[in-house]
Amino acid sequence: MSALLEVQDLHASYGHAQALFGVSFDVGVGEVVTLLGRNGMGRSTTIKCLFGLLPAKSGSITFAGKSIHNNPSHSIAQSGLGLVPEGRQVFPNLSVEENLVATARKPRKSGQILQEWGLERVYKFFPRLKERRMNLGVHLSGGEQQMLAIGRALMTNPQLLVLDEATEGLAPIIRDEIWDALTQLKQQGLSQIVIDKNVGALIKFADRHYVLEKGKVVWGGTSGELQGQKDIIHQYLGV
């Protein structure tokens, strides 16, 4: 499988406090990869570096064969990465429809060709958003806000969708809806990086996993391999 994203030996700090110590991982075309670990172990920091929200001190990030290392955030988004951020961060005073079109972009001409995302396709994918399309973001439930955050990212027509805390704080029935949606996206060939605490759901859904501990990758492998590593799950994920 050809690598869509390659992260090599990434180091990053918050002021004088180093947060990442040589993180390396890759994501293949059409593959779903997770970053696992307890809170504060470097997962979200890695995502911030990926999107240029935190400058990396050293290392390299290559996407679709081109370096995006420490590029401006808008340039990284334009290159084909879509982010569903922790906390959803929908625009509270815009309607659902205004949220969706605010960052919409046509697909890139080069690279992997996926079916184009537009308003009607997002509404078909998340019918509840169509029902609530005139409602302000602030008036949506947590589950609806997460659907909106995913829909907004899809409207940028990404080649790689990154979800930070994909189902955090959602009711179990809504969580299942989000996993179903992400599984459909995988079946459509969309590459994904997923951060979530629900290891059981991730093992069923993702292809490969990387476990982070204190800013380092301490384990990597397939879902089948992770399932057989009960000690890894217990030691690093507390499950």
Image (spheres, rainbow, N blue to C red):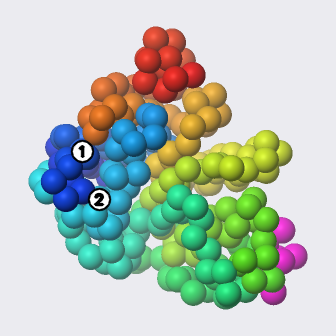
Helix, strand or loop: magenta stretch = helix
The quarter holding residue 139 reads bottom right
Residue 126 in magenta stretch: yes
**Residue 37 at what x, y percent from top left?**
44, 34
Magenta part of the chain: 125-134
Q: Residue furthest right?
A: 131
Q: Residues within 10 Å of mark 2 (few under 14, many from 20)?
A: many
**Residue 183 at what x, y percent from top left?**
65, 46
Q: Amino acid at mark 1?
A: Leu
Residue located 75% across and 59% down the image: 143
Q: In the displayed structure, would residue 38 be above or below residue 99?
A: above
Choose the circle earlier in sequence order: 2 or 1.
1
Residue 169 in magenta stretch: no
Q: Disc 1 designates what residue?
A: 20
Residue 208 in sight from this viewpoint: yes
Q: Disc number at residue 147?
A: none
Q: Disc 2 designates what residue?
A: 49
The image quadrant where one finds the C terminus is: top right
> In the visual, does 237 lie left or right of 18?
right
